[in-house]
Amino acid sequence: MKLLLTFTSILLCFFNVFSQTNREGTPYGANSDGRLISVFENLKNKTKGSKIKTEKISGSPYFEESFKTAQIVYFGKILKENIYIRYNAYSDEMEMAKSESQTSSDDALIKNKKITCTLNGYSYKYLNYIKENKQPAVGYLKELFKGNKFSLYVREIKEYKEGVKAKSSLEGSFPPRFTDKTDYYIALGDGSLKQTKLSKKHIVNTLSSYEQEIKSFINSNKVKLKNPSDIIKLFNFLEDI
């Protein structure tokens, strides 16, 4: 009888551990997959879809064709589940996948200012911005620098160009194609992101209240402010003033 009771107690302990381990999402059960599916469903939206057949177009709507592991911050919470993302720079969508081996997807990350996607070491944020001589717009921008006084973002997109047929033997023809376009945006403090050009003249005009400090920095460091790394060095300098 004692032997039977001892065996029964051991068996009950085993099933108790099994049940607890299963609830915590270890390989004994499918809870881990269930959580991923739940998170995926809450994050996704249907892609807009393309009105053009991309296989007949020169180039690609992506800067990177493959899906990459991304970190998602959802309303201030960092999600632990692996979500695979690639940026469709033509439709301005973060396409989502459950595996990096996927080659296509009908799902995209919900566009919300409180959802951030970190991909290849850069944070992509869905933000308002003001393009030069145009109405305010909203879209994905890649964060290059974020300080207390200054922010620098870049918007990298793909534009579709219609094909052109040659009208004569003296003219060339061009197939329909995707072309790359890069715009830079600066914000002062919590102000609006406004388009800027990477040049000494334009940066000084944009940040006129820091004109003397900028000129001093340029002279001391022998930079021309023609690339993002120069702007980041400048902002680091100005942040400490």
Image: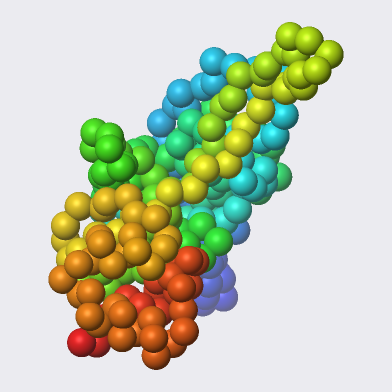
Q: Nearer the viewer, residue 236 or 109?
A: 236
Is residue 105 positioned above or below 216 on the image? above
Return the residue found at the far right: 169
Task: Determine the residue positioned at 34% across, 54% down.
Answer: 196
Going by the image, does 25 lie left or right of 204?
right
Task: Determine the residue positioned at 56% across, 45% down.
Answer: 86
Going by the image, does 92 lie left or right of 171?
left
Instruction: Name the quarter where the C terminus is drawn.
Output: bottom left
Residue 142 place in picture, x, y as percent: 42, 55
Residue 194 place in picture, x, y as percent: 27, 51
Task: Examine the rendering and report whether any part of residue 10 can be seen.
Answer: yes
Q: Nearer the viewer, residue 99 or 147?
A: 147
Task: Determine the residue positioned at 20% across, 75% down.
Answer: 210
Return the residue found at the far front: 170
The figure's colour scheme reads rainbow
Task: Determine the residue positioned at 28% across, 45% down.
Answer: 129
Going by the image, does 191 lie left or right of 173?
left
Residue 136 place in picture, x, y as percent: 24, 37
Q: Residue 235 appears in which quarter of the rendering?
A: bottom left
Is residue 56 positioned above or below 39 on the image? above
